[in-house]
Image (cartoon, rainbow, N blue to C red):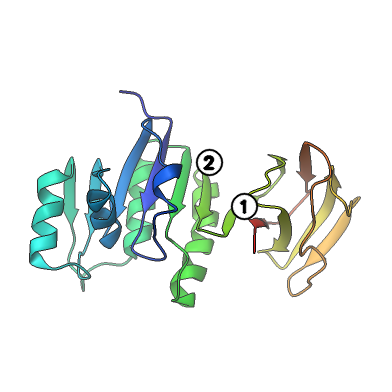
């Protein structure tokens, strides 16, 4: 069947909230323990990959039995995290719409590294979202239209580059016109959509668009 998007489930902050977000038309990639999560929730991954250092031998056997493909890499002789390996593989397989679930968790270094993966994906013309139970994060480098969603009432705009210029917002409670946002400023935090949809336009830079709920 033709898949509409690739969904990567990692071993970070996972839970039952993920299952309703999965669609039959998703190509499922389980990164390390994320593959076990999918198997245990009756959504075996089309591809399981990683070093699998966070699962037992019995759990790895279970993954191997149910996954469509399994790619195991050496836990020491590898350059990238399991999440990055999964993202690179999704891009290699020509998926331009990718969602990473469980990529945000208690390890801030891993969470921040996964946010930075949005830059790599953008360079490859792939649209990637990082999703957890309370947040949805994506990168804007030119323009982005978003629909109002009561599940994520807050929209924060934070520069990922030293500065973002020409920021213009429409449909927001606090509009901006040709504004500049600089790294370290909190000016773009906690905006709210007041129209059915909003638009974000920038002239230069890399802008994180973070939709969230308490």
Q: CA distance from mark 2 to mark 1?
A: 12 Å
- Residue at image coords 31%, 62%: 82
Viewer-proximal residue among 205 and 107: 107
Secondary structure found at label 2: loop
Q: Observer-nearest residue: 77 or 139?
A: 139
Query: Label 2: how many residues lie within 10 Å, few (<14), some (14-19) or many (20+)?
Result: some
**Label 2 or label 1, whichever comes before in sequence order:** 2
Q: Position of residue 154 (x, y in %)?
A: 72, 56
Label 2 vs label 1, nearer the camera: 1
Say left or right for 92 vs 199: left
Q: How many marks?
A: 2
Can you see residue 47? yes
Residue where numbered disc 1 is placed: 139
Which quarter of the image is occupied by the C terminus?
Answer: bottom right
Mark 2 vs 1: CB contact within 8 A? no
Question: Would you place residue 183 above or below residue 212 in this image?
Answer: below
Q: Residue at x 71, y 53 (%)?
A: 153
Secondary structure under the numbered disc 1 in the rendered image: strand
Q: Is residue 122 left or right of residue 188?
A: left
Give the numbered dot on residue 177: none
Q: x, y percentage for residue 13?
A: 42, 65
Does the image show residue 93? Answer: no
Image quadrant containing the N terminus: top left
In the rendered view, does 131 fall on the left or right side of 86? right
In this rendering, would 31 be left or right of 107? Answer: left
- Displayed quadrant of residue 186: bottom right
Instruction: Give residue 33's position: percent from left, percent from top.
Output: 26, 62
Residue tagged 2? 125
Q: Residue at x 17, y 49 (%)?
A: 70
* Neighbour tally class for label 1: few under 14, some 14-19, many 20 plus, Cα within 10 Å: many
x then y, percent, for residue 103: 44, 61
């Amino acid at each position: 069947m033709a898949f509409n998007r690739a969904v990567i489930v990692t071993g970070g902050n996972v839970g039952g909230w993920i299952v309703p977000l999965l669609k039959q038309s998703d190509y499922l990639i389980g990164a390390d323990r994320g593959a076990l999560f999918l198997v245990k929730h009756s959504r075996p991954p089309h591809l399981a990959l990683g070093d699998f250092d966070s699962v037992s031998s019995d759990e790895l056997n279970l993954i191997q039995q149910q996954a469509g493909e399994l790619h195991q890499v050496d836990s020491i002789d590898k350059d990238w995290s399991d999440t990055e390996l999964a993202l690179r593989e999704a891009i290699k397989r020509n998926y331009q719409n990718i969602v990473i679930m469980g990529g945000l968790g208690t390890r801030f270094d891993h969470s921040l590294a996964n946010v930075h993966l949005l830059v790599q994906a953008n360079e490859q013309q792939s649209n990637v979202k990082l999703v957890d139970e309370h947040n949805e994060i994506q990168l804007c480098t030119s323009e982005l239209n978003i629909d109002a969603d009561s599940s994520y009432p807050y929209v924060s705009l934070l520069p990922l580059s030293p500065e973002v210029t020409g920021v213009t917002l429409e449909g927001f409670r606090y509009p901006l016109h040709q504004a500049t946002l600089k790294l370290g400023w909190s000016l773009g935090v906690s905006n709210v959509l007041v129209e059915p949809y909003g638009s974000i336009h920038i002239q230069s830079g890399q802008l994180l668009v973070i939709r969230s709920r308490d």
